[in-house]
Amino acid sequence: MTEISWSDFEKVEIRVGTVVIAQDFPKARNPSYILTVDFGDEIGVKKSSAQITDLYSKEGLVGRQVLGVVNFPPKQVGPIMSECLVLGFYRKDNFVVLAMPDGEIENGARLL
């Protein structure tokens, strides 16, 4: 494991956002959704491709708060431009469990 400095960590903008739209992403190489996440007034609404179809339904994602990195440069993922990275953890079976706050918090709140 590579150690980083506190100043390295401070550069990563991990924010809370609410999924407002979850839709199928049939052109993705691996089963994925396109998520539209509202990160509040300061950050705004961003799109992300997320390979989370094994444990989450589109309907169950809408309204759910998630954590995301919002200061990576946009990345082309097939036909969409992914504007943030929704965070999660891989289980032993390679399914992704989303990183989420334990209680409701204002969109845009930063992880410190």
Image (tube, rainbow, N blue to C red):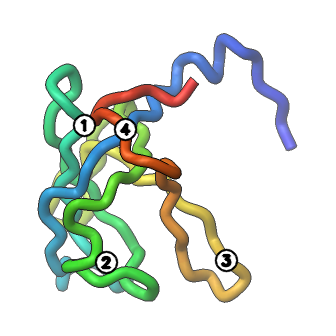
Q: Position of residue 58 (x, y in %)?
A: 22, 79
Question: Depth-wise, is mark 4 or mark 2 nearer the camera?
Answer: 4
Comparing 90 with 31, the one in front is 90
Cα–Cα gap, marks 3 and 1? 26 Å
Which SS class for mark 3? loop
Q: Which residue is mark 2?
A: 32
Identified by mark 4, the residue type is: Ile
Q: Which residue is mark 1?
A: 39
Identified by mark 1, the residue type is: Phe
Q: Which residue is mark 4?
A: 105
Which SS class for mark 1? loop
Of marks 4 and 2, which one's residue comes earlier in the chain?
Answer: 2
Residue 89 position by quadrant: bottom right
Callout 1: 10 Å neighbours few (<14), some, many (20+)? many
Identified by mark 3, the residue type is: Arg
Q: Are marks 3 and 1 in contact (CB under 8 Å)?
A: no
Furthest residue to the front?
Answer: 103
Q: Position of residue 78 (x, y in %)?
A: 22, 67
From this view, report whether residue 68 is shown above or below residue 112: below
